[in-house]
Image: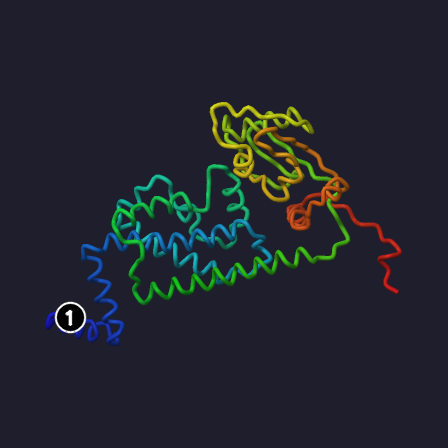
């Protein structure tokens, strides 16, 4: 105890620290040599990766150019900086084959196009696969909740606030799109599938690429050869169901309703590569958010003609 008190006083005197800061330094230094350090590092990696993944995932799926990313970008940078230090001193973490997303993107600001291209690849995710393996290390080590230093606790708290605030921005953006009064519309929705697995909507929005020979590739190849026809795809050795296969390459919600109006495990699917505005309206498909995204990406739009009802009297 006397040795600890002497070391504490030496830290205060040498580094001009207050007592609380000196205690934090001493506590952290002790954790680095304790038998629990490695287990705590695993738990820290899990907690920080979860937040970095949440930030990356929100950023990748949003129209970030129109939103304030100052707070989440700062939190992402600080989380990644800490994670790099943790991984540098832990072979088990750095040896995980499925690399964390921050190894490819240690910042997000200014990388909207690069991140969109990365997430378009069917084989990439926002870090969930890596995080699952980190969680395994935590479970085996018997420690899933980390002990934070005061400084790191603040980083985590700030990240939580930044994530909540950015989610609120995303919700507000989506709500404003739904109520947006527009004098334009998308006249026709078109889907193109290339032999390299590229899936394009209206020539501008690239969905996740289908890997050659995969279930999604087999499904899309057969669908493009039998448009507007009910048929049951032959996925060969793959056991994934039709709905899961389509979701895996981005066909859910509005896109599913437009291009795959029928998806049945028993009966099969109907693929329609072209859908007119009139058909979408007849099917009561809400395309408001899709229209705005396509327009922002440079898709062709049609201006509405002014009618007598549009003139305020």
Tell me which residue sits at (39%, 46%) in the image: 100
Image height check: is 190 above or below 83? above
Tell me which residue sits at (61%, 34%) in the image: 263
Q: Position of residue 301 (x, y in %)?
A: 74, 45
Query: Which of the pair 252/194 is nearer the observer?
Result: 252
Q: How dense is the environment of label 1, judged by Cα within 10 Å: few (below 14), some, or many (20 and up)?
A: some
Q: Does residue 298 appear left or right of residue 99 in this picture?
A: right
If the image is split into quadrants, where does the N terminus sit? Answer: bottom left
Tell me which residue sits at (29%, 51%) in the image: 42
Q: Position of residue 57 (x, y in %)?
A: 49, 50
Image height check: is 140 above or below 245? below
Image height check: is 214 above or below 97? above
* Mark 1 element type: helix
Residue at the spot of label 1 = 7
Q: Outermost residue, front direction?
A: 266
Q: Does residue 268 appear left or right of residue 183 in this picture?
A: left
Structure colour scheme: rainbow
């Amino acid at each position: 105890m006397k040795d600890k008190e002497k070391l504490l006083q030496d830290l205060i005197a040498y580094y001009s620290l207050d007592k609380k800061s000196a205690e934090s330094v001493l506590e952290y230094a002790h954790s680095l040599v304790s038998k629990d350090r490695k287990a705590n590092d695993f738990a820290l990696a899990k907690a920080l990766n979860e937040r970095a993944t949440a930030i990356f995932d929100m950023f990748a799926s949003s129209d970030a150019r129109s939103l304030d990313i100052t707070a989440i970008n700062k939190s992402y940078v600080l989380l990644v900086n800490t994670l790099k230090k943790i991984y540098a001193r832990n072979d088990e973490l750095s040896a995980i084959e499925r690399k964390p997303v921050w190894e490819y993107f240690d910042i997000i600001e200014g990388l909207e196009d690069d991140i969109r291209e990365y997430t378009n690849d069917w084989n990439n995710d926002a870090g969930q696969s890596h995080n699952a393996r980190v969680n395994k290390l935590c479970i085996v080590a018997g420690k899933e909740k980390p002990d934070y230093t005061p400084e790191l606790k603040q980083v985590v708290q700030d990240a939580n606030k930044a994530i909540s605030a950015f989610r609120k921005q995303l919700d507000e953006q989506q709500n404003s799109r739904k109520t947006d009064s527009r004098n334009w519309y998308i006249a026709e929705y078109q889907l193109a599938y290339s032999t390299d697995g590229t899936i394009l909507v209206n020539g501008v929005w690239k969905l996740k690429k289908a890997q050659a020979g995969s279930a999604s590739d087999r499904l899309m190849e057969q669908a493009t050869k039998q448009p507007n026809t009910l048929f049951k795809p032959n996925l060969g050795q793959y056991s994934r169901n039709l709905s899961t296969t389509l979701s895996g390459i981005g066909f859910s919600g509005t896109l599913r309703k437009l291009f795959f109006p029928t998806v049945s495990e028993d009966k099969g699917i109907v693929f329609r590569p072209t859908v007119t505005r009139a058909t979408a309206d007849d099917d009561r498909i809400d395309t408001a958010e899709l229209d705005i995204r396509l327009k922002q990406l440079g898709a062709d739009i049609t201006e509405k003609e002014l009618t007598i009802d549009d003139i305020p009297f």
